[in-house]
Structures are given as C-alpha cells and as structure tokens.
Image: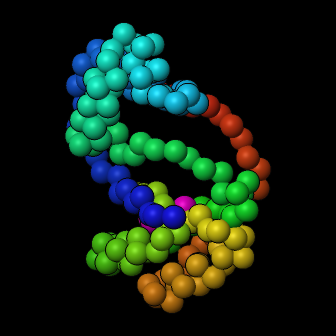
Amino acid sequence: MSATTETRHQVPTAILSPVEKALVNRLQHGLPLVPKPYAAVAGELGLSEQQVLESIKKLLAEGVLTRFGPMFHAGKLGGAFTLAAMRIPDEDFERVAEQVNSFDEVAHNYRREHDLNMWFVLATETPEAIESTIRAIEETTGHPVYNMPKEQEFHVHLHFPV
C-alpha cells in the first residue's frame, strides 16, 4: 500500500466553473461500476469523457481536490486500520512528518490545531501489524503514538454541495 499523505493548509476559496461544480457534486457520490466509469459520468453531465478527465486533473493540480481514488475497507480484505495521533513540537513537525510518512502503512497525514497536532491513518495487511507499525514509528521518531481504533462504524454519506 502506498502512502497518500496530505497536510492541510488554509487554502483560498476556489472559483469553480459550472462544469467543475457539477463534476465535484457528482463525484462525491462515487463512480459507477461499469467498464468506462468516466464516460458514464460524462454522459450523465452532458460532457465528453475527455472533459471529465481533464477537469479532474486540473482540480487535483490546483489543490481543489487533494485526493481522488478508490477507498478500500482494509478490515474486509483481511487487514486493519486505525486512527493515530501524535504530539509533536512545532520545531520538529516537518522532520517527524517526513519520518512518519516514510512508512507505507501511513495515509492521510494531517496537521491539526490541537494538543495532539499530527493525525494519520494506519492501514496494514494484518490486524497484528498495527501495533508493530506503531512501535516502529515511535522508535523512528522518538515520540509516542496514540492509537484510536474505531469502536463502531457509521456510514454518514456526507456530501458537500458546491
């Protein structure tokens, strides 16, 4: 599993074209499970497949979208995932972020304005690997990792109309 790491910064509000707005609103509901999903979305929106693909690339390049890709349920695939947090002094944050992000198991690394200021998701191939990965991160960084496994799963289906 490759890490997709993101650090959130205050980003100016993007001005989206009507096509981009329609596309972002539609993509929040997922892609259809068909041989040509982008063509199907394009057909729904009255666009060409090329327009859809170019718009997604542009939105990613501009930082409007920070990630676009599949989401897998690690637990159903035999693996595990957990939310983890760390308390990192500001002067060490970038160095520790690089160390944490060097682990393939780390995804979605975010800086937060909180006492626990580094939050990330660990996804591993086995449930046992969560603890060993946490120990390895602690040994590498010299900072404790707070493991916050989910106790109950909720499907909110949150969408942000633009």
The chief SS type of the magenta part is strand
Q: Would you identify the image quadrant in which residue 60 lies?
A: top left
Q: Position of residue 115 (x, y in %)?
A: 47, 66
Asked if residue 154 is among those painted magenta in the image, a careful observer would answer no
- 135 displayed left or right of 118: right
Residue at x-position 37% and y-position 72%: 97
Question: In which quadrant will I find the C terminus?
Answer: top left
Q: Is residue 161 visible?
A: no
Q: Is residue 28 visible?
A: yes
Asked if residue 119 is among those painted magenta in the image, a careful observer would answer yes
Read off the magenta span. Answer: 117-121
Residue extending farthest to the front is 35
Q: Would you identify the image quadrant in which residue 123 lies?
A: bottom right
Q: Position of residue 1 (x, y in %)?
A: 51, 64
**What colour scheme has been applied to the protein in the rendered image?**
rainbow
Q: Nearer the viewer, residue 48 or 118?
A: 48
- 90 displayed left or right of 154: left
Residue at x-position 33% and y-position 15%: 47
Residue at x-position 51% and y-position 81%: 137
Q: Nearer the viewer, residue 94 or 128?
A: 128
